Image (spheres, rainbow, N blue to C red):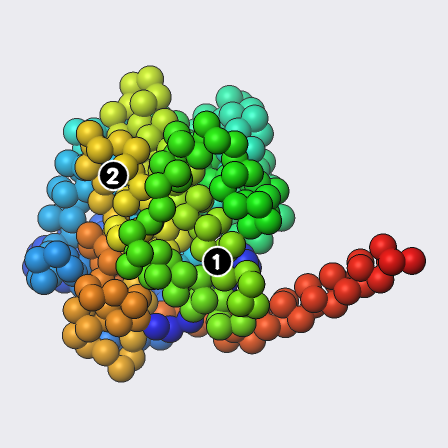
Amino acid sequence: MPRLLPILLLAGLLGACAAPGGAPPGSPGAPWRSEEGRDHPLAGKIWMPGEGRFVTPEALLAALGEARFAVLGEVHDNWDHHRIQAWLTARLMAGDRAPALAFEMITTAEKAALDAYLATHPRDAAGLGPAVKWTARGWPDWAMYAPIAQAALDAGAPIVGADMSRPRVRAIIKEGVAALGAARVRALGLDKPLPRALAQRLRWEIVESHCDQLPASMIDPMATAMGARDAYMADAVRAAARLPGRDGAILITGAGHARADHGVPYRLGILAPEGRALGLAMVEVDPDETDPGANAARFNAPTLPYDYVWFTPRAARAEPCERFADQLRRAKERHLREREKSDD
C-alpha cells in the first residue's frame, strides 16, 4: 500500500445528480485541492466493500445517519479528506440524530483547556486548535480541521477529545496494557486478545506505517499501544454519545483507526453492541489500480477493511519514509547522548 504518514509523526460540485460515484450539490469534489490523481477513474467514488458496489453520497449519509457511531477516517495531511469530513459532519448534525463530535487529535487530557475555550467561545472554531496546543503536538494546520469543528458548534453539539495522552501511550509501550490498571483493562475489553488473524493485520499495519524501519523489539509493543488506543477512543466515543441531549457520536480520526476489522468500529462492537458503528475511510487513489476491490491488498486484508471507502486524489507530499528515517536517526542519537550523560 502507498506509505501513509508514519504514526509517530505525527467546495466544488461534481454535478447536480447523485449518480453512483457522483456528489450532490454542495458536497466536496472537483475541483479537488489535492494535486495527484484528480483524473483517476475512482476519484470521488464511494465503494461499499461488503456489497461490492458503488453508492451515492446521499446513500452514505443515510447509512451513517442510521448508525449510532460514525467513524470518519482520514489521511491527516489531505485537505480533501477534511472537506469531506466537514460536509458529512454538517449534514449529520442537521439530520434526525443529535451526535456529539470527538477528535482523535485532542486527548482527554486536554478536556479542561477544551471546555474552558468552548465556555467563552461557543460558536468560534478558529481558536479551538490553539487553545488545545494543536500545532505543538505535530498535527497538520488546524485550518484543515476547523470547518469540521465549526459544523458541530453551529449545531450546538459538544466537542470532546477521544485519544489517550502521549505519556500514557508511552507507558503502555513500555509496560503493556497493565499500565492502565486491571480494572481499566477489563472495562476496555483489553483483557481479551484480538483474534489471531486480526492481531496479525494490526502488527502488519504497525510495520508498514513505520516504513519497515521499527526495531523488531518495538513492533509488538507498538501494536499493543495501537489496540489500546482504539479501545480507549471507542470508550470515549461511547461516553460522548451519552452526553445530555445526544444520541450518537462522530469520531474524526486517522484511517487506520477507522478499520472495521480491528479499529475503533470493532472495539465499539465490543463496548457498545447496542449501537451500530460504521467506519468510513477516505482513501487516496493508487495510480496503478482502478479496481476498487483490488485496493484491499494495500491494507493486507481480503476486502477493504471499512464499511465504506471514499476515494480521493493524493496530496502532494515529501516522501514520508525519508522523513521518518531522519527522525528515527535523530531519536537514536538523542537516546545515546542521554545514556552517555547518565553514565557520567
The answer to whether residue 176 is seen in the rendering is: yes
Tell me the residue that label 1 is attached to: 220
The amino acid type, in three-letter code, at marker 2 is: Gly
The spot of residue 262 in percent (x, y) is 31, 51
State the mark number for residue 6. none
First along the sequence among labels 1 and 2: 1
Task: Using residue 53 as the reference point, say whether residue 310 is left or right of it.
Answer: right
Quadrant in the picture for the N terminus:
bottom left
Q: Amino acid at mark 1?
A: Asp
Q: Residue at x 80, y 59 (%)?
A: 339
- The circle on residue 269 is 2
From mark 1 to mark 2, how far is it between C-alphas? Answer: 24 Å
The reply to whether dot 1 and dot 2 touch (C-beta < 8 Å) is no
Query: Which residue corresponds to the image point at 58% horizontal and 36% vertical from the top-left?
Result: 131
Quarter holding the C terminus? bottom right
Name the secondary structure under disc 1: helix
Query: Where is residue 287 shown, x and y percent of the image?
Result: 29, 79
Percent across and percent down for residue 332 are: 70, 66
Question: Measured along the vertical axis of the image, is residue 250 above or below residue 323?
Answer: above
Kindly tell me whether residue 124 is visible in this rendering. no
Q: Can you say whether 230 is above or below 341 in the image?
A: above
